[in-house]
Image (spheres, rainbow, N blue to C red):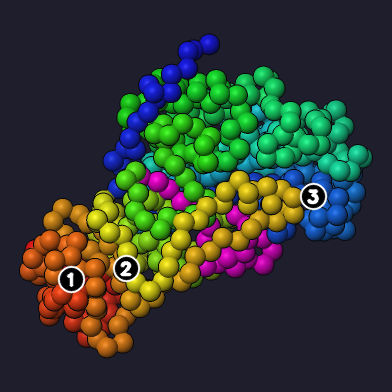
Amino acid sequence: MKEMNWDLLKREAPEWFRDAKFGLFFHWGPYSVPACENEWYSRNMYCKGLSQNLYHEKTYGPLKQFGYKEFYSGMTGTRFDAREWAALIKRAGARYGGPVTEHCDNFSLWDSTVNPVNSVRYGPHRDVMGECARAFREESIRLLATFHHQWLWGWFMSTDSEADVYDPVNEKYYGPALPLETNRYHPYRYPDAKFCRIWKEKVREVIDQYHPDVIYFDSRSNIIEEQARFDVVEHYYHEKGGTEHIITYKQEDFPKEVGVYDIECGRFSLPKPYPWQSDDRLEDNITWCMVQQPKYKPAGHIIHQLCDIVSKNGNLLLNVGPYADGSFHPEAVRILEEIGDWLALNGEAIYGTRPFVIAAEGPTTVDDADYDVGKIKEQLDKGSAVDVRSDLLGEGDYRFTTKGSALYAISMGWPEDGWFHIYALRQNGPYRGAAENITMVGCGESLAFYRDELGLHVKAPRKAPCDHAYVLKICG
């Protein structure tokens, strides 16, 4: 057992991560087969009276006859092609990505010797993580691995005493029978030594076999004994990799400065001095996986969200869930391609940028928000997630980024009077440059402008070069 000294594991986020700004990940598992409401189906189907439980028993029968393990075979993966996933990431303009390596349901998406319940032995009979690792790296996409399996402690414990999770022969699928209270966020009975050892061995196995560039730990990692958490980070940083690897974590599950702080569906009102990440979903349903009647947020919403996050020193990690066969909904693909088109034109104001002294101006208020422990506990009680959304941005809202000597002012709307009025860039304001030349990215000509004590006023081009958001490049 190694002595724990978290100070030795503190590190800054690597430059590639700070430059990347945008990633994609994919919730795909046996829960994609029923595609009912959300990815917590594997838990909620065992909670008598919840809507997913009622749906399950009506559709598939009693829990003692049709348990979660019966969905494995339906996760066929017949249309899963890691090269197509890589192409989608690249087309969307994302720079890193990966599958949800293991969700809360004990189904590993890699060729595991630690866990017999994996995608090689069941479901698609494919090494999903291995195929993604090869395909993504061929396209110069940084590899992400996400771990949610601390939630397995108590996850399947059912209010139905006849449920198949209590049959000892099914322990390898669901874990050991535990007191029902262990499915709480902070249980009285914390994971035992065996559970923590397996938790650690799963993470180490993925590190050793696939060498991910970034590891994302979901919330509730704090219930795992500290030594196990320390060991996986120490192994990842010191034994497997130089300075290019980084973890992301939520709440206070790991010490500050050991990795990148992640806020689920979150945002900050002000720029932060440290890099951070928000993981959110393309899905407009309150779900992270494919559901029976999927809806998706419009491209403009995601583009505005990305601009807001980047202006405040953050990255956006966006989820989209495939069908059980491994393919994506055409509307999701179309929206991701629309985002990619915007980034192909305007990416110089996003990739590789750093924050300006101020992040934003405009009439729309953006408050701090996070899918915090209180919201998680509410989801555990009700079986459905709380929706966290920000107000839509529009005309008069700007986000600022910098690169070298250039300042980028990204307008979230097209001005009705034909002039962009940026009050934060007034004379004697926070921008000390001379503003000698201003262009709009995607348009060739220099734009007319003047600057006074009220603001910087820039004449809009005759025609917008794109939709959704418009980038003014200010040099001086």
In the image, 450 versus 237, the foreground residue is 450
Amino acid type, label 3: Met
Q: Is residue 251 magenta?
A: no
* Residue 198 spot, x, y in % from top left: 63, 24
Real-space Cα separation, disc 3 to disc 1, in angstroms: 58 Å
Quarter holding the C terminus is: bottom left
Mark 3 or mark 1, which has the lower sequence index? Answer: 3
* Residue 72 spot, x, y in % from top left: 72, 43
> Which label sits on residue 45?
3
With 11 as the anchor, is 64 left or right in this view?
Answer: right
In the image, 189 versus 79, the foreground residue is 189
* Residue 87 spot, x, y in % from top left: 42, 54
Are the residues at dot 2 and dot 3 in contact (C-beta closer than 8 Å)? Answer: no
Amino acid type, label 1: Arg
How many numbered badges does the structure rendering display? 3
Q: Which residues are magenta?
A: 275-297
Q: Is residue 281 magenta?
A: yes
In the image, 195 versus 321, the foreground residue is 195
Q: Residue 463 falls in which quadrant of the image? A: bottom left
> Which label sits on residue 361?
2
